[in-house]
Image (tube, coloured by chain):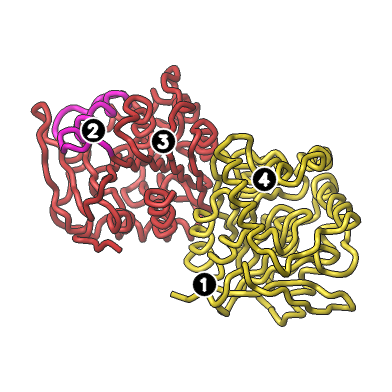
Chain colours: A yellow, B red
Amino acid sequence: MAVVKNSFGNTPTQYIEIDGVAYAYRRLGTPAAVPLIGYQHFTGTLDNWDPVIIDGLAQYREVIVFDNRGVGNSGGKTPATVAEMTADAIAFASALGISRFDVLGFSLGGFIAQQLAVERPDLVRKMIIVGAAPQGAKVLQAFPQLIEKAMKLEEAERFLFIFFTASEESRAKGRATLQRLYARTEDRDRTTAAESVMAQLRAITAWGTDPVTIDLSKVAHPALIVQGSNDEMMDSDNSYVLFKQLPNAVLSYYPDAAHGSFFQYPELFVNEANFFLDRY
Amino acid sequence: MAVVKNSFGNTPTQYIEIDGVAYAYRRLGTPAAVPLIGYQHFTGTLDNWDPVIIDGLAQYREVIVFDNRGVGNSGGKTPATVAEMTADAIAFASALGISRFDVLGFSLGGFIAQQLAVERPDLVRKMIIVGAAPQGAKVLQAFPQLIEKAMKLEEAERFLFIFFTASEESRAKGRATLQRLYARTEDRDRTTAAESVMAQLRAITAWGTDPVTIDLSKVAHPALIVQGSNDEMMDSDNSYVLFKQLPNAVLSYYPDAAHGSFFQYPELFVNEANFFLDRY
């Protein structure tokens, strides 16, 4: 059994320059043949990855998370399409000299994972898609309204509103998640700039409303899809739709959970993700 | 970590008499606070439990599987309702002096698990339901026709038809499953008698067509639901329906899999079942 060399909580932020843009990233764990790269959710930065999850995955592999262009501490201007974000994600892996990797895509990051698997199947070994939807998901038309509603709440309540259900059990898990996310006090990321947030919002809405351009039925990669029972943002049913489109996907739903399913059940997620990545 | 004391392949069949009926069962593993009792599928006997799965679960607990009334080597007359089968399952646990247990219900056994959780919630700690459907599932109207079709096939082909998809990958996993099921050559069960099979068939059809009498929304037990992507017998969508009815269920779908999802991915199943039983 591999030993964790450091933990996500004290992994320093590094930078790599690509075409004049400095990308912020953190890299930890045990170097293995295939590293895992994480693609983050709408507005999320390096500090929005759950340390329990990252450490759990990094027990058996190298895990790299990064701020895509214009997000958090990364420079440059955030593009307004998933396709351009995917191009930036490809450039990032290439700059690190990584030619084949596993993907953990959360929400918007799960859109990038799908686009990447279709465009550059050679780069991807396996992918984990949490809290996402396939291209053309009609529910995304309502995404801006949900975010507008969320923005009126103070920060902790906004986090609970977006990622957890209204049940007291779910909200308690949400408060525990917040504590984990804020346990790190130094070398934190900047909050993502408003202009980048708006570009991401356009990309998410367009993923649902623009014509479908990618064909998941030809994606042979093993995939693990994870979703909560009550994700209003993505509509939970869309993960079942995604499962039916992907030929080789395992699908897991977690109970009384919303968009932040893996925040709510981090140990359950780590157990199934590690099995999927190493033994499936 | 517990050690397997024996393996399912060489666990002797035992008998216990209840109201003049001798029930056949096998019991193995490490005695722990809560044993797991398995409820078998339509026509299935002790020999239809996958040794890889039973041994995997018995690493960490005691596992007991039995032939319900009139099935395999058990005496008595098989009842034609799930409710009566559930009463017999309760009598069996009681006769062994077991007052609280986990349940693994496969197909028809998954119906019994649901009925049991509603009727006698005190007896059940957690339940795993594989390849099943909730009461009132319309697809079960077509179950007799599918079985009639299956009965025309020779034994190995029948097994593949019922439990696996038409893909060569799935069928290969099916043939491997058959080898595991037939590795045991001595102390095997009798084939279930035709009269019992007909009674089970009536019970399964009635589960789908009779009025719904149990309310799963009040079942607080943790549940793990497992299903294949393409189960024609139960209609795969019904596991998502079941998930939505149960307040505290984790749901997993396996790809390119039919009614025998856990036969096709035994290690995947054992990993998630053990986590669910001991750490969820």
Q: Same subunit under labels 2 and 1?
A: no
- Residue nearest the viewer, comparing A195 with A144: A195
- Whole-number angstrom distance, CA of label 3 to CA of label 1: 33 Å
* Circle nearer the viewer, 4 or 1: 4
- The type of residue carrying mark 4 is Phe
Residue A159 inside the magenta-drawn segment: no
- Asked which secondary structure carries label 3, the reply is loop
Instruction: Say how many tags the image has.
Output: 4
Q: How crowded is mark 3: few (under 14 residues within 10 Å), some or many (20 or more)?
A: some
| Callout 2: chain | B
* Circle nearer the viewer, 2 or 1: 1
At 69% from the left and 64% from the top, the residue drawn is: A185
At 30% from the left and 56% from the top, the residue drawn is: B60
Q: How crowded is mark 1: few (under 14 residues within 10 Å), some or many (20 or more)?
A: many
Q: Mark 4 points at which residue?
A: A163
| Callout 3: chain | B
x and y percentages locating residue B202 in the rendered image? 33, 25
Q: Extreme front residue here? A: A185
User: Which label number is shown at residue B194?
Assistant: 2
Residue numbers of the magenta segment: B75-100
At 80% from the left and 37% from the top, the residue drawn is: A149
Q: Please state if B219 lies on the left or on the right of B79 as rendered.
A: right
- Whole-number angstrom distance, CA of label 4 to CA of label 3: 24 Å
